[in-house]
Image (cartoon, rainbow, N blue to C red):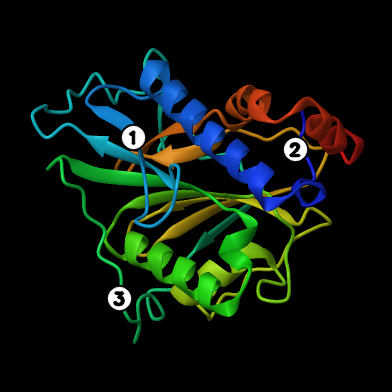
Amino acid sequence: MPLHDWTRVSAGTFHGFHNAWITELSRALNNGVLPSPFYAEAEQVAGQTGPDVLALEMDSRQFIADEVLAPDGSSGVATLLDAEPQVTVTQVASDAEVYSERRNRLAIRHASGDRLVAYIELLSSGNKASRRMLDRFLDKVYSVIEQGIHLLVVDPYPPGPLDPQGIHAAIWNEIDPSTPFRFPDARHLTAVSYHAQRPPTAYVEPLAVGQVIPDMPLFLDGTHYVNTPLESTYNAALSVVPKHLRERLVEGA
């Protein structure tokens, strides 16, 4: 089922779907997509209800065997040397601009002691509802990438006055303002994977209402990634949306 126009329903309806999508992503990643010792776990921000992001971690008690990350197809793990992610736009930050004079306000930590590897962030309309909310989100994203934690961001909402070229353009302006991003065509929704190396690389796939959502890379380390099943998990999560609201979404697709 293609991507829907989520502006046709309330923020509360999307919130329920958002939580279900995170659950379905966690289920898929932990049941065949991720190799051992990696695992995904939903995390909740204080003061909010329901999961906010999906964290990818590595069990600190285990080692990564060479065969686990070998790109033989059996584990689903790909390597940049053999399979560059298939996206519309790839951006590599300029060494001169990366992290210059930038504040670091948010410390990312996890109580389990296992090593945090990556985050999946599904945006809601509230993330871009005001300058304060957007700045909070950008600070969080910048801090994550600065710490070498990989990131996959999906924004199913169209650009607004605060992000006229979409959420990736706003994020990339924090990382490397010397190479601004502009949408290459009429697709103005966003899926973007950040490979948190130095300098960072962004793999950007513009999306549109009515378009099938492609799998997106989620990086495990400097060279290896898995393809995240966005479309199948999106479809599974839709079952939590009440029937009459699903029909409203379909009318807008």
What amino acid is labelled 1 in the image? Glu
For residue 3, the mark is 2
Q: Position of residue 20 (x, y in %)?
A: 54, 32
Residue 2 in which image quadrant: top right
**Identity of the residue drawn at 41% across and 80% down:** 97
Q: Secondary structure at mark 1?
A: strand
- Say which residue label 3 marks: 104
Seen at 82% across and 48% down, the residue is 8
Contact, mark 3 vs mark 1 (Cβ under 8 Å): no
Does the CB distance between marks 2 and 3 fall below 8 Å? Answer: no
Task: Tell me the residue that label 1 is attached to.
Answer: 41
Q: Can I make out residue 136 in this image?
A: yes
- At numbered mark 3, what does the secondary structure look like: helix, strand or loop? loop
- Residue 122, position as x, y percentages in the image: 54, 47
State left or right for residue 29 relative to residue 4: left
Q: Of residues 184 and 143, which is closer to you in this image?
A: 143
Observer-nearest of 64 and 80: 64
